[in-house]
Structure formats: C-alpha cells, structure tokens
C-alpha cells in the first residue's frame, strides 16, 4: 500500500505549516488562553486559508476534500497546539450537516466554510460515560418544530457557537439508539451556556436547554448511525492532531537534551536517556501508524469502522500518555512551567486522551467487537 502523500496534500501541509509557524506562535497562543481560549481573528485566518471549507461539499462553498487531507491539516494544527475548534466545526459538525436535511443545513454549511458561523456537536452528558446511546435530553414536538430540554457538557467553543447539533431522545420513539434524533438548536431563548476554559486552555462550556426551539436535522433511525460516524471522524482527527503534537514535543525534548548539560556534558550523551527517547519515538511511530489506519477506515462499513477507530483510540491513548510523561521527565522541572511549551503539549495530550471516550472505554469497545474471533482473524 502506498502511504506517500500527493503533491496537493504536501502543498496543503506546507501552507498550514507556514501559517502556524508565522501566525500562531507560542506567545500568541498564551495570549489567546488568557483571553478565554478562542480568538476570532485567528479563526478568520483559518477561514481565509480555505481550511474551514475543506470537507464542505462544493455546492455549499467548500472544497469537498477527503479524510486524508483532513489528517494532513490536523497534524500541522497539532504541532502548533491551535486552540480554535477546527475539527469540531470543520470536520465533525459539517459531516452531520451534510448528512442532514438539505434545506436546514445548506446555509449553515456555507456559513461554516466562510468562517461566519460556528456550529458544534453537543453530545456529551454527565451520566453517559462516553456511551453515545445514553441520552437523557428530551425532544418534544411543538407545532411545526421541536422543544428540547436537557444538559450537554464540555461543548467545544460553546460560548462562541451560533448553533449546536444536539442528539436528543424523541418522545414516544423506541428506546435505545433507535429513539434518538439530531436537532439543530440556535442560540436564543431557552438556551444557556456556562462557558469555561479547559485544562489545555481551549474554550468550552456546558449547554443547558430549557424548552429550547430546535429544527430536526436527522430523524430517529438515521440519526444514530450519522452520530456514530461523526464521532469516528472526530477520533480520526484527534489521532492526527495527537501525532502532530507528539512529533513536535519529541523535537522540543531532543533539542533540550542536546543543549542541557550535566557533569560538563549534554544529557543527550547519557545512554539511559537515549534509551528512553528511543522508546518515546517507538510509541510515536505506533501512534502515527494507527492514525493512518483510523483515517483510511472512515469509509468502511459501520462494524469494521467502529472497531478500527476504537483500536486507534486505544493505541493513541497509550502513546499520548507515555510520550507526554517521558518528555516531561526528560525535561525535569522546567517541563511543567507555564513559560515553557513542553507542559502545554502535555496538558493537550492529556485532554485528548479523555476526548471522545478514554482509553479504558475504547478498550472495552474493542473487546466487545472482537468476541466472535477473539481478534485472531480481525
């Protein structure tokens, strides 16, 4: 199998890397964190690069590119620890909008592509424990529309979103996944956002719906498979972002080891530390391979795709934890100071390990989906 990137994909990588190196410096990022974890001017710069329309269909003002192109972009954004919610908006939300009611979604897709509108998926609930079918938010018909009541937590850029895609259990619908619909809820009456900054510095918030008006995007039956695929798109994007972040963290660590002296010599000459950085690079390459695997499996049938994405999340979780901890250890005390970038990579990797289901959750998913063969012929 050919894993080389096309010339167009390399050009895309170069354009994103040039922007993050020149326009999204560590100093600018620290300022954005202090300002609440989101910068509208940085968001518009991402839009001006055309990245927000990367996977928006061409008829809605986008480029209609595929998963590999998204992986290339996410690796570069991960290297710079970009705080703005690129994947939640440009990849996850657009996949649901494109799958939903064309009349409802068209203007929102165009707004996302231009950078004017931010739409995010709000699916997590406190008692769900990463289970997508565990939803307590209710949707009841009200005339020609719907009224939604419930609470969603840790919604990306919640305080800056113009609309939310909300999974809710439809009244009088079947129990389980078949009774879940997807609704588009705009900011307004009955919608309250409690905004905060997460541990990695990104803007987030809890969404509280009290009879909020919603428009049906996907009806029960079609909604849950679309939600599962959107989450898989998010996992694949997260994997690519993690590879970019780990790649840069390893570079920073090696640079430090080549300059930090102990007993009159650089610590990079110590055999024990060289062995540790070798183990780190092995974990990085395992993560890179599984990131490719996750991206290439996005168009597979549901059973194979879901298992593959959980397998990738397990490996990425293990790699992120190992690489982050070892690189901080190799830095010593400076690694956890706010003025030095290594600790910020560690925080971001830790948050990513918990996003879209932690390692233990996905280990259980892999186990449940491999019972027939015990993984021997998977």
Image (cartoon, rainbow, N blue to C red):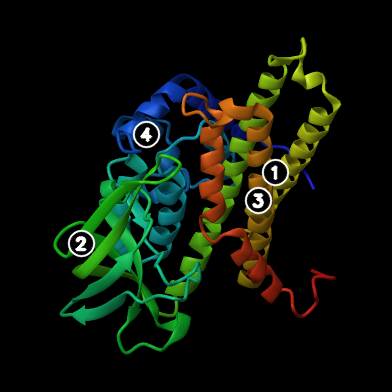
Q: Is residue 250 above or below residue 141?
A: above
**Mark 1 or mark 2, which has the lower sequence index?**
2
**Mark 2 or mark 3, which has the lower sequence index?**
2
Q: Secondary structure under badge 1?
A: helix
Q: Secondary structure under badge 2?
A: strand
Please tell me in which quadrant of the rendered image residue 247 appears: top right
Badge nearest the viewer, 1 or 4? 4
- Taking the image as shown, residue 47 lies to the left or right of residue 296, namely left
Density class for disc 2 (Cα within 10 Å; few <14, some 14-19, many ≥20) is: some
State the residue at coordinates (48%, 71%): 132
Q: Can the viewer see residue 13 in this picture?
A: yes
Residue 155 or 174: which is nearer the viewer? Answer: 155
Q: CA distance from mark 2 to mark 3?
A: 35 Å
- What label does residue 316 carry, if any? 3
Q: Can the viewer see residue 66 in this picture?
A: no
**Mark 4 or mark 3, which has the lower sequence index?**
4
Badge nearest the viewer, 4 or 2? 4
Density class for disc 4 (Cα within 10 Å; few <14, some 14-19, many ≥20) is: some
Q: CA distance from mark 4 to mark 2?
A: 25 Å
Q: Which residue is mark 4?
A: 33
- What label does residue 288 carry, if any? 1
């Amino acid at each position: 199998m050919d894993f080389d990137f096309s010339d167009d994909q390399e050009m895309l990588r170069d354009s994103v890397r040039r922007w993050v190196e020149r326009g999204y410096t560590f100093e600018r990022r620290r300022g954005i964190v202090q300002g609440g974890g989101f910068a509208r001017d940085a968001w518009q710069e991402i839009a001006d690069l055309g990245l927000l329309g990367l996977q928006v269909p061409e008829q809605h003002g986008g480029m209609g590119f595929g998963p590999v192109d998204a992986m290339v972009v996410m690796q570069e954004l991960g290297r710079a620890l970009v705080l703005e919610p690129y994947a939640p908006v440009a990849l996850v939300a657009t996949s649901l909008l494109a799958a939903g009611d064309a009349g409802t979604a068209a203007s929102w897709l165009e707004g996302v592509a231009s950078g004017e509108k931010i739409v995010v998926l709000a699916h997590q609930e406190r008692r769900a424990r990463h289970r997508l079918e565990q939803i307590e938010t209710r949707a009841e018909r009200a005339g020609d529309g719907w009224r939604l009541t419930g609470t969603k937590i840790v919604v990306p850029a919640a305080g800056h979103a113009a609309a939310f895609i909300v999974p809710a259990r439809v009244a009088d619908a079947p129990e389980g996944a078949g009774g879940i619909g997807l609704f588009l809820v705009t900011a307004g009456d009955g919608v309250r956002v409690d905004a905060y900054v997460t541990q990695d510095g990104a803007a987030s918030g809890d969404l509280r719906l009290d009879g909020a008006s919603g428009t049906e995007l996907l009806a029960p039956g079609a909604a849950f498979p679309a939600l599962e695929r959107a989450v898989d798109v998010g996992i694949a994007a997260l994997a690519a972002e993690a590879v970019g972040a780990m790649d840069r963290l390893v570079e920073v660590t090696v640079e430090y080891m080549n300059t930090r002296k102990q007993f009159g010599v650089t610590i990079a000459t110590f055999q024990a530390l060289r062995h540790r950085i070798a183990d780190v690079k092995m974990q990085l390459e395992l993560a890179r391979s599984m990131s490719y695997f996750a991206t290439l499996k996005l168009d597979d049938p549901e059973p194979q795709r879901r298992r593959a994405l959980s397998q990738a999340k397990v490996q990425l979780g293990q790699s992120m934890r190992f690489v982050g901890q070892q690189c901080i250890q190799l830095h010593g005390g400076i690694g956890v100071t706010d003025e030095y970038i290594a600790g910020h990579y560690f925080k971001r990797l830790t948050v990513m390990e918990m996003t879209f289901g932690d390692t233990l959750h996905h280990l259980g998913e892999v186990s449940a989906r491999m019972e027939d063969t015990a993984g021997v012929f998977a």
